[in-house]
Amino acid sequence: MSTIETVEFYDHLLEKGVELFAGVPDSLLKDLCACIYDRTPREANIVAANEGNAVGIAVGYHVATGKYAAVYLQNSGLGNIVNPVASLAHPDVYGVPMLLIIGWRGEPGVKDEPQHVAQGRLTPAMLDSLEVPYTVLDAEGWQGQVDDALALMQAENKPVALVVRKGLFSKYSFTQENPKPEITLSREEALAEVLEAIGSDAFVVSTTGKTSREVFELRESRGEGHAHDFLTVGGMGHSSSIAMGAALGTEELVYCIDGDGGFLMHMGSAPVIAQRARDNFRYILINNGAHESVGGQPTVAFDIDIPAILRGSGFEHVELVSEASSIPSALERIAAKPRSALIIETAQGSRDDLGRPTVSPSENKVAMLEAFAESRN
């Protein structure tokens, strides 16, 4: 497959007047996102909490400058941009030009994970419904496609989209400075300690990306099965709400194992959970300060006081650890206290041979239904 030279594409956007980038990194756009991160001043590349936030940033930038931004996202993030695109940026409202660069996970005919299949099939229809003109980028004629999209965007004062297929951009590597070099604990090591401490009968809802993949493989290695784990393979940012809902339907403890990217994406759920969750809900946040599953671009999670945010939301007992030896005793205290949370700081990195779940989401759901039913008997 022919590729687009990533640096050439980035430079072309700058030449055409793109001065601001905002978005949420995507695995199909990881080389472009790496290039943007590496070559753009920090104030001109905003890794947003969610894709709708990025659209809002683009709206504000245009209103202040008359210029426009590029918003990058995976197509799974289209749901987060529906409201700000339709009720703010649409030409029937404010008419804000912006360039959406969308990674096309689940493209029909291209093998992908279950959570991307429907989204991939629906992507063109969603853009049509939003009345956002789009072009599927081609490696041979991309300059003309970009220029035509930008011309339409400016002429009609509306968002336009470039849809990016898998493998379209050339490789771009970047070295990110480690914000906390003193932390050597890996996420998988932390998860192993967590699963050991909470026991095989505990119910777990784990967040998107590599966290759920590692939970699955750890269960496999321990011979424990998967009926007590809800692997949130899609719906980034909603693991804590899923866990809250599960806790409403059982007397058993339900643990949410979240990530910093997911926490930030829908952080407004934290105070609702703290105030309204039953006493059997427990929250574990693994913070490595990055969107590691889609390329390693940083989040702001190491720059903010997460324990204070959780306490301010209403969690009554909050602990923070960064060493494996501290996890078992911390979880013993967490398990004993309602409205409690544990933040585990880890380094980035995962095994090169990390696999993916071999149990389908629907099979996982059926097994959990049976496990919850057994716990009530």
Image (tube, rainbow, N blue to C red):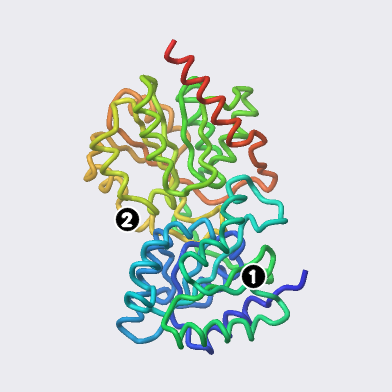
Q: Position of residue 275 (x, y in %)?
A: 23, 37
Q: Which residue is mark 1?
A: 172
| Quadrant of the drawing holding the C terminus | top left
Give the amino acid type for the residue marked by disc 1 in the picture.
Tyr
Residue density around tag 1, few if under 14, some if 14–19, many if 20 or more, within 10 Å = some
Q: Position of residue 66 (x, y in %)?
A: 35, 87
Q: Earlier in the sequence, mark 1 or mark 2?
A: 1
Give the amino acid type for the residue marked by disc 2 in the picture.
Ile
Q: Which residue is mark 2?
A: 304
Would residue 194 be visible to someone looking at this image? yes
Q: Is 23 situated left or right of 6 in this image?
A: left
Q: Is residue 3 placed above or below 236 in the rendered structure?
A: below
Label 2 sits on a secondary structure element that is loop
Q: Are marks 1 and 2 in contact (CB under 8 Å)?
A: no
**135 or 129, nearer to the observer:** 129
Outermost residue toward the top? 377
| Residue at x-position 66% and y-position 80% | 142
- Label of residue 315 in the image: none
Q: Is 163 situated left or right of 286 in this image?
A: right
| Residue at x-position 39% and y-position 20% | 252
Would residue 321 be visible to someone looking at this image? no
Q: Quadrant of residue 284?
A: top left
| Residue at x-position 67% and y-position 51% | 112
Q: Is residue 255 placed above or below 11 in the rendered structure?
A: above
| Residue at x-position 43% and y-position 65% | 47
**300 or 234, nearer to the observer:** 234
Label 1 sits on a secondary structure element that is loop
Outermost residue toward the right? 1
